[in-house]
Structure formats: C-alpha cells, structure tokens
Image: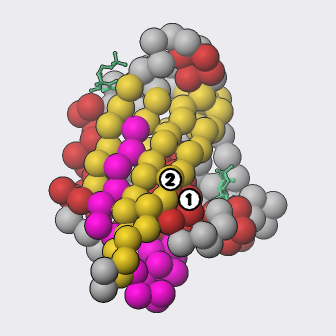
Amino acid sequence: MQLRIGNGYDIHRLVPGRALILGGQRLEHPAGLGLDGHSDADVLVHAIMDALLGALSLGDIGLYFPPDDPQWQGADSLELLEQVVALVMERGWSVVNVDSVLVAERPKLKPHIAAMCSAIASRMGLTADQVGVKATTNEQLGPEGREEGISCHAVVLLQKP
Ligand SMILES: Nc1ccn([C@@H]2O[C@H](COP(=O)(O)O)[C@@H](O)[C@H]2O)c(=O)n1
Ligand SMILES: C[C@@]1(CO)OP(=O)(O)OP(=O)(O)OC[C@H]1O
C-alpha cells in the first residue's frame, strides 16, 4: 500500500458585511464580522482542499478555481471540495483521515465543531470520525489575535492499495 501526506493553510480577513462560514456552517461573530473573499471564504475547507492537492503534488486551489474567475464568485467551498476529492479518487487514492486547526479569537467554535466535521465528512465520502477539526485562539497575538482574520491549518493522509 502507498501512503501520501499533504498539508494546507489559508487565512481570510474578518470584515463587516460578510458572512462567517466555517466548515460549511454559517456562524455569528460577536462583532458582526465575516470572512472576506471571492468565494464564501471558508478557510477550513480551503485548507483541506490544499492539503488534498498537496498530497498528490497537484498544485493548489487557485489553479483549479482562480480567484479572478467570476465563475467562483460566492462559491460554496464544500462544492469545490467535492471536485477536489473527485480528482483524488479518480487517481485511485482514498482519504485515511483529515486533521485541522482553526485559529480564531472569536466566536467560540467548540459548539459548532461536530456539525463542521459531519458536513465535511459527508462531502468527502467519509465518516465524521475521519475528520478532525480543532480550534485555538491566538492568545490575542498576531492578525488572528487582533481579530483581523481567521486562519486554518490542515493535514490529510491518503492511501492507495
Ligand atoms: N475560537 C475558539 C478558540 C478556542 N476554542 C476552544 O477553547 C480551547 C482553549 O483555547 P486556547 O486558545 O485558550 O488554548 C480550545 O482548545 C478550544 O476547545 C473555541 O472553541 N473557539
Ligand atoms: C476558492 C477560491 C476561489 O476564488 O476562493 P477565495 O475566496 O478567493 O479564497 P483564497 O483562499 O484566497 O483563494 C482560493 C480561491 O481559489
């Protein structure tokens, strides 16, 4: 059996007047902020997509969904994730597991983690226990700590018989 590992990272700015969508869940920010981007700016799903592509040296999400292409304006990142998983599966690979960490000062993400795992797992053809989503503050340090943005790191493991 062959194994491949991939890692992904993304960060988006927190701004007024935008929705806050993480792992496909629409959340409320206490200051009414949301994530800016060409798509729905779901940093968690973007980091997972980049980890999947990275595991097979297939480039990054900007290659498949260019940020200057109007086709992806307001895109639902979970739908893009389905397309990236298809690229992986058509090459004979399957996902062993996904792990990720969201860096966000607010809102409290813990109550939403299970829903994020279920939504991501269902779009990836996995069970929720194959998808890890964790959250940490940045202890008020750096851009995430100043609530200028939310970032996410993700890793995936792929296997091929
Ligand atoms: N936006 C967040 C950040 C953190 N959590 C949870 O709180 C725990 C402690 O966070 P620290 O940054 O102080 O280590 C963390 O392990 C998460 O369970 C959260 O729910 N939402
Ligand atoms: C999926 C895309 C599509 O525009 O989303 P964006 O909201 O632009 O987010 P970013 O992580 O900056 O780049 C990835 C893009 O491919």
Task: Report if residue 150 lies within the magenta region.
Answer: no
Say what secondary structure mark 2 lies in.
Answer: strand
**Residue 123 lies in quadrant:** bottom left
Looking at the image, can residue 149 be seen? Answer: yes
Residue 50 badge: 1
Q: Residue 99 location, x and y as percent?
A: 35, 49
Q: How is the image coloured?
A: secondary structure
**Is residue 100 shown above or below 128?**
above
Q: Disc 1 vs disc 2: which is toward the camera?
A: 2
Hey, which quadrant is residue 74 in on the image? bottom right
Where, quadrant-wise, is the C terminus in this rendering?
bottom left
Residues 142 and 36: in front is 142
- Other-residue count near label 2 (Cα within 10 Å), few / some / many at <14 / 14–19 / ≥20: many
Residue 7: mark: 2
Label 1: how many Cα within 10 Å (few below 14, some 14–19, many 20+): many
Residue at (51, 76) in percent of width and height = 83
Q: Which quarter of the rendered picture does the N terminus lie within?
A: bottom left
Q: What's the residue at 34%, 25% (across, down)?
A: 108
Marks 1/2 in contact by CB < 8 Å: the verdict is: yes
